[in-house]
Amino acid sequence: MAKVKITGHASGSGVITVTAPNTSTDRTITLPDSTATIATTAATDALTTRVNGASGKKNLIINGAMQVAQRGASKSGYTAGGYHTCDRWIHDKAAATGTFTMTQEADAPVGFKNSLKVNCTTVGSSGSYNAIQTRLESQDTAHLAYGTSSAKAVTLSFWVKVSQTGNQQMNLIHHADAGSRQISFVYTINQANTWEKKTVTFPGDTARVGDDDTTVGFYLEWFLSSYSGRTGSAVLTSWGSYTNAARFEGATISIGDSTSDTWQITGVQLEEGSVATEFEGRSYGEELTLCERYYETSMTHGDLSQYQGQQPVPGLASATYGATASSAGGRQFRTWKRATPTVTIYHQDGTSGGVYLIHNAAKITGVSASHINQNGFLFVTKSSGFNSGYYYYYGITVDAEL
């Protein structure tokens, strides 16, 4: 087999010579000084690759392939915004902006298994906004050097499937203590109910220094509809001050005006640099651990019945916590949380604030977690009602979402 010989170095002329296997002549690849693309000088040559600007995992998006859905694969009939199915993906909406069903679908383009889908089931009559978002910690975007002359570009790629044709708008919102900034991308849906891949490169924001902590750094939002308040300003195709009036201005498609409206997304990747590379797939276990930094549950769709007898918690003597409260043992979380979380205790029938007494199947209600930190909690407590020497068990949800 012929060999590829590379000679030269990056200093001096900056030219590296490659002897191709199928030719006796040399081909020259010129390395650019400030971009991430390597291409041959000949227009007919097809060599293009990517040199990642940062080592390690390149995709800044968690659960971009919609693999993990700890809250369940389907949520129907909701009007309030929130995290409903696929982890790290929130439906940010006004309560009156229609009723929706959200599902984790086994429908995706080649190379993917799942997608997130929203379907309008009752048309909205009022309200102001309707968007799908994912949110990134500021410490995970600090390496982009925003607010400096060295601010780095990022490239977004995603697959989308929509029941209508026309234009939709996606916004990248950079949050910082000194004020939020925004840049937008208007993309076209060319064919209804068909998977289409979209890519865009956003330049670095040189004007606003980002935070470097566990607070939100980026919102990535795909705006679906707006009855009022999110139009009236020009589309921000370059970085500018965040404004509600520019979040939906470039769209001609509105998801939520008809019960036939559907919208799906998967394969979301945000990476440093100006070239969209192949999607970085992670194992389910890796993705689950990343998701659990923000949300963890011991339950399956609000039902603990299949876990009866799992992780029994010993009842402790009365008044072991505080002057009058009685308590049962706490738990350590599987994954260290982003911040001190909200912990909800569940009885095996799905009732919040309840625990199950194994001795006689009694249901004790009115309990809560106490002494909570990012790694777990010490006690499940109430004013009285736990009996020393007996075993209890319960389920938990642990929420530290951005």
Image: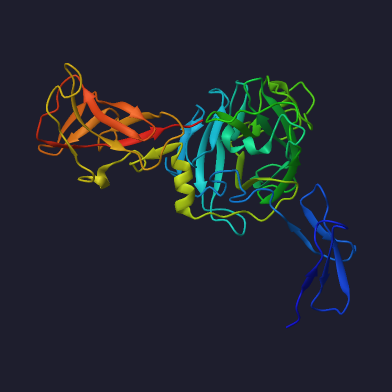
Image height check: is 196 above or below 143? below
Outermost residue to the front: 12
Question: Residue 380 vs residue 244: left or right?
Answer: left
At which x and y percent is residue 187?
Answer: 74, 41
149 and 277: which is toward the camera: 149
At which x and y percent is residue 123?
Answer: 58, 29
Outermost residue to the top: 323
Residue in the image at 56% along x and 53% along y: 107
100 and 3: which is toward the camera: 3
The answer to whether residue 289 is seen in the rendering is yes
At which x and y percent is residue 341?
Answer: 40, 29
At which x and y percent is residue 241?
Answer: 73, 22
Q: Quadrant of residue 362?
A: top left
303 and 312: which is toward the camera: 312
Question: Residue 187 vs residue 380: left or right?
Answer: right
261 and 183: which is toward the camera: 183
Question: Residue 7 vs residue 378: left or right?
Answer: right
Image height check: is 169 above or below 63? above
Question: Residue 128 vs residue 206: left or right?
Answer: left
Residue in the image at 49% along x and 41% along y: 87
Q: Quadrant of residue 281?
A: bottom right
Residue in the image at 24% along x and 23% along y: 366
